[in-house]
Amino acid sequence: MCDNKDECCNKLEAEAIHTNEQLLAFNVRSKDVNWHEYVTPKKPRSSPVYLQRQFNLISNYREPIGNHNRRKVLLCHDMMGNYLEDRHYHSSKKYDDYRFYHWSAVDYFCYFSHKYITIPPCGWINAAHKHGVSVLGTFITEGSDGAKRLHDILASTEMIDNIVDAMVKLCKHYHFEGWLINVECKVESDSMENLYYFLNRLREAVEQHVEAGVVFWYDSVIETGQLSWQNELNAKNVRFFRSTHATLINYSWDDKSLEQTRSLCEQERAHSQSVFFGIDVFGRNQIAKFQSKRTLARIAKNRFSVGIFAPAWTYETLQQFGYNIKQETGDDAVNETFLLRNEKFWWLLWDHLATHPYNTLAFYTDFCMGSGKRTYVSGLPKAAVEDGSEAAASESEGFFNLSRQSLQPSVPLHDLATRHYDDAFNGGSCLRISQCDSSFRLFATDFKLPGGGLVFAYAYKLSPQDGEFDCILRFCTSNNARDCYLFLGDYYDTVSLQRGRCYVSPFKPKYNELLSGPLECPQIPKDMAFPDFQANGWRVRYYVVEFDGGIQVKDIGVLYRKTPEARDTAYLGAVYLNEFNVNHHDFPVDSNIALIQVYGGDLLN
């Protein structure tokens, strides 16, 4: 692993490839790096559901998805040429830089630049993979130089085979899943068959050698080789569609384009989800920006997928309002305004997007977005923890490192909670709760707990005079018969069962030695449940629940009950959920373990 020395860090810095010779020679500075040590494997995820207008509610409304209504999302990230502060493996100090974090709605993430071969930086790969999202690099030929490179590739099938092998090698070396092919230059007519050969060969190679490998074609040249964006699928470009896994349609389409494409998909007996209609968020030839929902609704109505191009519009355009987005160490005003704009932008779109529930245990998040003004550990700045003094806290530097991004909420939290950068439990930020007296969803989940045991822990900050705080789990029996709710707050050492609701008190810390293995989360120290071990106002609660059979956890949400005299609000710093087998553990009755007979009927009567 990298020891944070300049020579090592330089090798890990992301870069593009500029020539065929460089590509074929595998002439990259990290060619000797074992990226397996640095890249997070792509996590599994549940099949998506449509939450529609109820996406912020802890609700059992979920529209199942099949081939008849599946719509996917390609996020194409192009910001000021890219390879900016995100190119560093370890970190920059620019904590306010652009972050994407609404991964639960995204199927594919493409890192885009106008360089020949764009290799995604490790931070983007890691953030996407943690959330189960496939990552694409970009192959682009444009202008006279690009035309010359493409001409050389298409000169022979032998050259094509070598280029394809080299592109697959990049996927395997850097651990990303495929390519967006963007040919934006004229192709000689006698080279067209070899262009189709290139696409077919590349598709077959990534299918064979890259796990979840995928190739996208961008609507550009037509069957004659002319550069002529069609803004739809038709007879002039359908062969490119057949040769790849999906097509990204240029963003100058209209309603007739949707009709024509739907007709061709029916003719080809192809799923419409393989066609991604483009929306340039900057608004080129479409209604976009904060009105992007109107354009997305037209795509969704026709059951096509969407390619969202340049989502960093929410960040870049801050310059138009007098914000300086190029300060090397970041700026509070830039950070706060970007997060508010970004949250609103995605909140407006979410009605038409599918949400992928989390399904892998153990589940832990500290809400870190991959940046911070300083790094916190168990409620204290890391410098203070390492130095042993509060005075060292000021030495903790800001950071921007998307590899450090934790699992993010499943839905936008516009007007419900904000990202708070002046405090955190772990990482660089926490959630500051804005909505009071009404619960809301944080995570859509599909956790199966066949062993009947559940452990849940969270770190929060709330002054007693400011109110009370609960995390809420919506769960059902293993046969999905009926919804029930766990309210995990402080109920004075009691467990109260009402119809469909369980009010559970924290596990008593004097029995903490029984919390080991899956029952303990090292990132949320159990000893912080003792009042004497609280740090900087942060508190920890653990809950242990035993059911009389397996259950499924479908949602994680929160409820903050604010007092009239409150001067601040609640903060949520970390969450942990895991399962255990009730037959392998034994707890004293006075430990506040909750014993719930969901199958026996006590809870449902």
Image: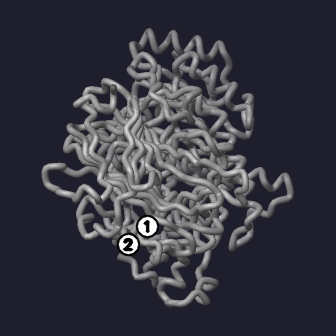
Instruction: Please rate how many residues cluster around mark 2, counting C-alpha atoms within 10 Å: few if below 14, some from 14 to 19, many from 20.
Output: some
Is 209 situated above or below 575?
Answer: above
Q: Looking at the rendered structure, which numbered label has been put on residue 28?
A: 1
Q: Are marks 1 and 2 in contact (CB under 8 Å)?
A: no
| Residue 81 placement: quadrant | bottom right
Instruction: Please rate how many residues cluster around mark 1, counting C-alpha atoms within 10 Å: few if below 14, some from 14 to 19, many from 20.
Output: some
Residue 185 visible in image: no
At 53% across and 50% down in the image, what residue appears?
A: 111
User: Helix or strand or loop: what does disc 1 sit on?
Assistant: loop
Disc 1 to disc 2, C-alpha distance: 48 Å
Residue 284 falls left or right of residue 576 = right
What amino acid is found at the position of numbered circle 2 in the picture?
Asp
Label 2 sits on residue: 527
State which tag comes first along the sequence, 1 or 2.
Answer: 1
535, 176: nearer the viewer: 535
At 61% across and 23% down in the image, what residue appears?
A: 230
Position of the C terminus, as image quadrant, is top left
**Position in image of residue 601 (x %, y %):** 27, 28
